[in-house]
């Protein structure tokens, strides 16, 4: 594979995954909408998936690709639980952002 | 030939399963599922059925684990791994399985009275407790980082829901959401750590990683170090180590008290089980690289937890910060990276499990209906109003302060000795300072319970949501839980050999199983 005349190595994918992971992490810390925060978690998990696949290719080892299936299942389970909690919170406080959910302090 | 036909000719060899080895795990998870379905399909059974069922399930699972103990510590047979080497059954995993079962039993005892008082029903809380414990068992037994991740998620996802399980209390849902967001963030970091470690070593199996690191000298360690760091961050969140502790006070304050009892005992124990397994077993050849990081983490956690506990006015938040500083003490044992240090950490975790569960048993009663009356003011004069309850709480607090004749003394003594033996003198000094600051916090609660100036005034500020002065009713199940926790704390305090023997037996097995 080539891109603009240079060979695309697994390293490219590793860098891309690191960038995606960082976008997700920063987004989670910066954005205040609970749903967008979820999407950021998903972005982080999928960036890790890309890392696993890239390493799997570089190491010529199928284990890394098998891991991706586990991660996808876990991500789905996490969304189910997370959305349930967010729905429960938003029912009590419609249009709440993460800053509004702050009755616990000390 | 079609692709499908080709595929059917390839014989798939599945790994062999040692069913006795995974039996404690199955005995936690499968009956929990049955209980969940039975509760939704069958007509309502008498109250207390779910508590009894949960205690029975956890007892049977713990009993099976104990039966495995004699098998794995027998020199003739020894520890073994199953499921393709991904699931290790050794003294270490058996130790934590029993600990998690004990933690579930105590939490279930507290939950019974709690759910009645709050007018909540259903089997969900109990089922989630059992499922979460099964995740903890997987973490303690995982010999593969991916299995470790699955265990971590099974443990955590159940606890997120448990934290948010009080439907009528917004603080509980807020706690659930905060815990979920930060927990999911830490899981993602943890997973990225696994990916980088896999990239650096070519394996996710702890034994594979260990073999690779022993046999090869890495010229460019950057990838591996980044993997270490991210794995440590992931575990740091779970065990509430500074600077990854920010969720702890809010979640402890907002979550239902029985759930907090489980979080502080079971979840913390499982987090440390995973941490020890990954770092002490998998990365043991690189210990000079990760020891300094854990050293710094331990100092920050010891001091941060103890100092921040001093300025709190809510007893639940005090216990949250104190649980942070206890995590620091256990990290002192981890940092030693020796069999003494690991044995001391195991002893500490076992002793702390009972002390913190007992503390939250008292707090869950004093917090009254609504579970929000837990300020220092609410505890004023408890010694007059409920002498036995106050006495039990005093034992728990003195134990956590590390007073002799309680298990807490030998726990602290063990980790500090391990730090001194590994020549971490400054760390030992900081740990002792933290113990002194911590003692101030616990004494503050004890003083508030016993030394109110005016006996008639005692407890006048303790009113329920309607402004009616509190009438404390202690359910029988809470007495049972308190009896067990006080008994263990004092018994181990007088005869520490009972537990040190077990904790030390659990350590060398762990190393041998991985070697």
Image (cartoon, rainbow, N blue to C red):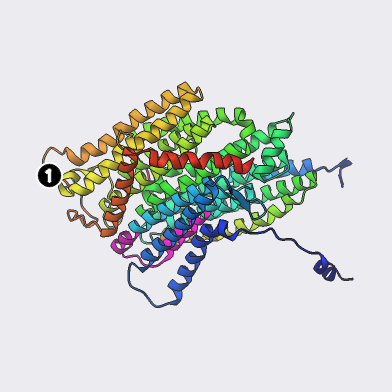
Residue B228 is left or right of residue B399, and the answer is right
Q: Does residue B147 appear to the left or right of B35 in the view shown? A: right
Residue A32 appearing in the image: no
Q: Which residues are magenta?
A: B111-136
Q: Is residue B112 magenta-colored? A: yes
Q: Quadrant of the C terminus of chain A?
A: top left
Q: From the viewer's side, name the closer residue of B244 and B269.
A: B269
**x, y percentage for residue B246?**
45, 40
Left or right: where does residue B103 sit relative to residue B515?
Answer: left
Chain holding disc 1:
B
Asked if one can make out residue A23 in the rendered structure from this viewpoint, the answer is yes
Report x, y in % for residue B182: 51, 46
Residue at image coords 79%, 47%? A57
Total tally of numbered discs in the picture: 1
Say whether residue B493 is left or right of residue A42: left
- In the figure, B339 relative to A54: above or below? above
Query: x, y percentage for residue B79?
Result: 58, 48
**Percent position of residue B88, x then y:** 59, 49
Q: Which secondary structure is most common in the magenta stretch?
A: helix
Q: Nearer the viewer, residue B154 or A49?
A: B154
Residue occupied by mark 1: B457
* CA neighbours of label 1 inside 10 A, class few (<14), some (14 to 19), many (20+): few
- Residue at the limit of the structure toward the bottom, as seen here: B43
Magenta stretch contains residue B159: no
Nearer the observer, B194 or B168 = B194
- Front residue of B238 and A85: B238
- Identify the secondary structure beneath mark 1: loop
């Amino acid at each position: 594979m080539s891109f603009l005349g240079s060979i695309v190595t697994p390293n490219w994918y590793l860098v891309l995954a690191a960038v995606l992971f960082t976008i997700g992490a920063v987004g989670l810390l910066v954005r205040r909408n609970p749903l967008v925060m979820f999407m950021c978690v998903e972005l982080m998990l999928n960036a890790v998936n890309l890392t696993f696949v890239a390493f799997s290719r570089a190491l010529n080892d199928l284990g890394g690709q098998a891991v991706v299936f586990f991660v996808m299942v876990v991500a789905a389970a996490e969304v189910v639980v997370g959305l349930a909690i967010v729905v429960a919170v938003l029912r009590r406080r419609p249009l709440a952002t993460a800053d509004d959910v702050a009755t616990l302090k000390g | 030939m079609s692709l499908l036909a080709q595929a059917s000719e390839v014989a798939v060899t599945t790994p062999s399963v040692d069913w006795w080895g995974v039996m404690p795990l199955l005995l936690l998870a499968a009956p929990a599922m049955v209980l969940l379905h039975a509760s939704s399909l069958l007509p309502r059974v008498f109250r207390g059925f779910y508590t009894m069922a949960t205690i029975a399930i956890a007892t049977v699972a713990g009993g099976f684990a104990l039966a495995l103990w004699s098998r794995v510590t027998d020199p003739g047979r020894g520890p073994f791994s199953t499921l393709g080497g991904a699931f290790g059954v050794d003294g270490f995993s058996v130790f934590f399985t029993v600990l998690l079962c004990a933690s579930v039993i105590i939490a279930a005892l507290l939950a019974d009275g709690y759910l009645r008082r709050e007018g909540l029903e259903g089997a969900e809380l109990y089922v989630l407790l059992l499922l979460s414990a099964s995740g903890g068992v997987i973490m303690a037994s995982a010999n593969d980082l991916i299995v470790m991740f699955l265990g971590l998620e099974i443990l955590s996802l159940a606890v997120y829901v448990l934290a948010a399980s009080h439907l009528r209390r917004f603080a509980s849902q807020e706690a659930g959401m905060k815990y979920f967001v930060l927990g999911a963030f830490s899981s993602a970091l943890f997973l990225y750590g696994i990916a980088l470690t896999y990239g650096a070593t070519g394996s996710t199996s702890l034994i594979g990683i260990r073999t690779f690191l022993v046999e090869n000298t890495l010229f460019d360690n950057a990838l591996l170090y980044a993997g270490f760091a991210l794995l440590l961050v992931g575990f740091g969140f779970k065990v509430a180590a500074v600077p990854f502790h920010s969720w702890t006070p809010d979640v402890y304050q907002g979550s239902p008290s029985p759930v907090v009892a489980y979080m502080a005992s079971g979840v913390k124990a499982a987090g440390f089980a995973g941490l020890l397994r990954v770092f002490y077993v998998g990365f043991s050849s690189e210990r000079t690289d990760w020891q300094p990081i854990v050293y710094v983490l331990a100092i920050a956690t010891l001091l941060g937890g103890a100092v921040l506990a001093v300025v709190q006015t809510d007893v639940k938040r005090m216990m949250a910060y104190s649980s942070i500083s206890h995590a620091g003490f256990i990290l002192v044992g981890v940092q030693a990276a020796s069999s003494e240090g690991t044995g001391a950490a195991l002893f500490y975790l076992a002793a702390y499990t009972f002390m913190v569960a007992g503390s939250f048993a008292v707090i869950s009663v004093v917090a009254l209906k609504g579970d929000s009356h837990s300020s220092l003011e609410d505890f004023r004069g408890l010694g007059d109003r409920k002498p036995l309850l106050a006495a039990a709480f005093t034992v728990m607090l003195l134990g956590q302060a590390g007073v002799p004749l309680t298990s807490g003394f030998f726990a602290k003594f063990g980790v500090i000795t391990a730090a001194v033996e590994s020549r971490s003198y400054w760390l030992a000094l900081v740990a002792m300072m933290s113990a002194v600051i911590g003692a101030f916090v616990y004494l503050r609660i004890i003083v508030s319970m016993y030394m109110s100036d005016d006996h008639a005034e005692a407890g006048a500020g303790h009113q329920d949501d309607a402004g009616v002065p509190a009438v404390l009713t202690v359910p029988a199940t809470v007495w049972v839980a308190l009896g067990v926790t006080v008994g263990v704390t004092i018994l181990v305090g007088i005869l520490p050999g009972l537990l040190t023997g077990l904790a030390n037996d659990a350590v060398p097995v762990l190393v041998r199983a991985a070697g």
